[in-house]
Image (cartoon, rainbow, N blue to C red):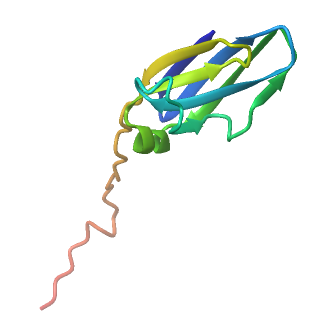
Amino acid sequence: MLKATATGGKLKVDYTGYGVSERDIRIVATKKGAFPDLKNVVSLTGGKMIHTSAAAKTGSLSVDYEDLAKLLGRDIDVVIDDGYGRTAIKTVHLPKMPKKWTIYRPSSLSQRVISFG
């Protein structure tokens, strides 16, 4: 099971990897449509495998996605290899973050008019 959503600058991934023996689960992001070529991927687990021997390993992770968008584009595939021969892929669009605006609020100092003469 794989669910991925992108909102507010965060990519949230919920996953369940299934198996019957000790294994390593890998979760990566790649350009949309690149699977099965996983040469250019970004690990969503900091380069670490998720080691488990549980029949069903469930978890979630959250990462900032702006760097992913710069490397892979706005449309990506999140891929989970459950370490037991099954792969799930979820395509996600990474929306652009709105620009932050600086709000100008006049103060009593900025409203003073200074005249010389």
From the viewer's perspective, is residue 93 above or below residue 44?
above
**Direction from residue 49 to residue 13 in the image, left or right:** left
From the viewer's perspective, is residue 23 above or below residue 68?
above
> x and y percent of residue 102 in the render?
35, 53
Quadrant housing residue 107: bottom left
From the viewer's perspective, is residue 13 above or below residue 41?
above
Location of the C terminus by quadrant is: bottom left
Is 82 in front, or is 39?
39
Instruction: Please tell me which residue is depicted at 77% across the width and 28% down the height of the picture.
Output: 50
Number of numbered discs on residues: 0
**Direction from residue 54 to residue 30 in the image, left or right:** left
Location of the N terminus by quadrant is: top right
> x and y percent of residue 23 in the render?
81, 21
Quadrant housing residue 24: top right
**Direction from residue 20 to residue 9 in the image, left or right:** left
Instruction: Please tell me which residue is depicted at 48% across the width and 23% down the height of the picture.
Output: 35
Q: Looking at this rendering, what residue extends furthest in the left direction?
A: 117
Quadrant housing residue 32: top left
**Direction from residue 100 to residue 46 in the image, left or right:** right
Q: Looking at this rendering, what residue extends furthest in the bottom direction?
A: 117
Instruction: Please tell me which residue is depicted at 41% across the width and 30% down the height of the picture.
Output: 94
Is 64 in front, or is 79?
79
> x and y percent of residue 95 in the render?
37, 31
